[in-house]
Amino acid sequence: MSTLTLIRHAQASFLEEDYDRLSPLGERQASLLGEYWAKTGAGFNAVFCGPRKRHIRTFELAAAACRESAVRLPEPVILQELDEYRADEVMRVYLEPLAGTHGHIRALNEDYRRAKGTPDAARYIELLFRAVTTMWVGGEFDSSKVEDWERFCRRVRTGLAQTRNHGAKGASIAVFTSAGPTAVAMQAALKLAPQATLELSWLVRNSACSTFLFSGDRFSLWSFNEVPHLQEPALVTYR
């Protein structure tokens, strides 16, 4: 059996102008992951990254921490297919029209606008984001202007297939990506419904590792959402 370990990127810069940049805490999370791998003797035959800065930077910091203990990670292959779903586009294109036709979206949007610049802003934008993406996944509005949920899942499955085709039998492969692709892998292993898959994506912790066993057509869950490298509660984040 071979193993495929999906690593969600470390904490990005939520609610800042450049979300794709790791926060200082995120940089610490990524380095701790590499230190943990070095201590435990974890090794990978191949590494893949999604295309975002947060994916690649998480790999870079983990790899640097490994090198300090003379452990080397392979150079990563960048795969566009391992990118996150286009949440920013969904919100940009559909939020205002939905707020005009759906009272609960309008109310959440107004709550968020009032909370901008306050500590409550993160909570309100998350509630708004969840409401819109739940409708997007459920096909409750015409999302033809952006990548829809089914196309996203197909894209990720294509990327995961490419990673699984790499290396010999018994290979250990690492994939640095986001919560959405991690949830799609869980969907493939556990045959989850679309809404359950989306909800699972919200539970994936920053820099968490989820490992799957595969051989031929078999693809099975081994572990989910593990953060043994984050020993202090303050280091564990979801956004």
Image (cartoon, helix red, strand yellow):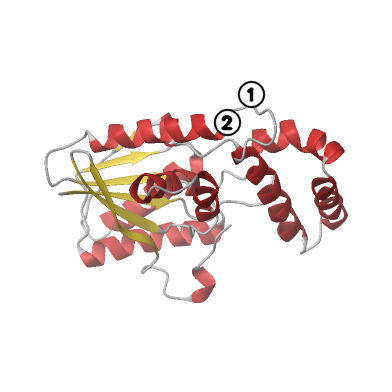
Residue 140 placement (x, y as % from top left)? 68, 36
Q: Residue at x 59, y 40 (%)?
A: 137
**136 horizontally vs 218: left or right:** right
Q: Are marks 2 and 1 in contact (CB under 8 Å)?
A: yes
Report which residue position mark 2 lands on. Answer: 148
At label 1, which amino acid type do we have?
Ser
Does residue 78 appear anywhere in the picture? no
Around disc 1, counting alpha carbons within 10 Å, would you say few (fewer than 14), some (14 to 19), or many (20 or more)? few
Q: Residue at x 58, y 35 (%)?
A: 86
- In front: 209, or 221? 221
Which residue of the protein is positioned furthest toward the left in this rendering? 169
Residue 192 placement (x, y as % from top left)? 44, 49
- In front: 194, or 206? 194
What is the C-alpha distance between the residues marked 2 and 1? 7 Å
In the displayed structure, 138 sits above or below 37; it is: above
The image quadrant that residue 221 belongs to is bottom left
Q: Residue at x 36, y 51 (%)?
A: 190
Residue 188 placement (x, y as % from top left)? 36, 44
Report which residue position mark 1 lands on. Answer: 144
Around disc 2, counting alpha carbons within 10 Å, would you say few (fewer than 14), some (14 to 19), or many (20 or more)? some
Which residue of the protein is positioned furthest toward the bottom in this rendering? 232
* Mark 2 secondary-structure assignment: loop
At label 2, which amino acid type do we have?
Asp
* Mark 1 secondary-structure assignment: loop
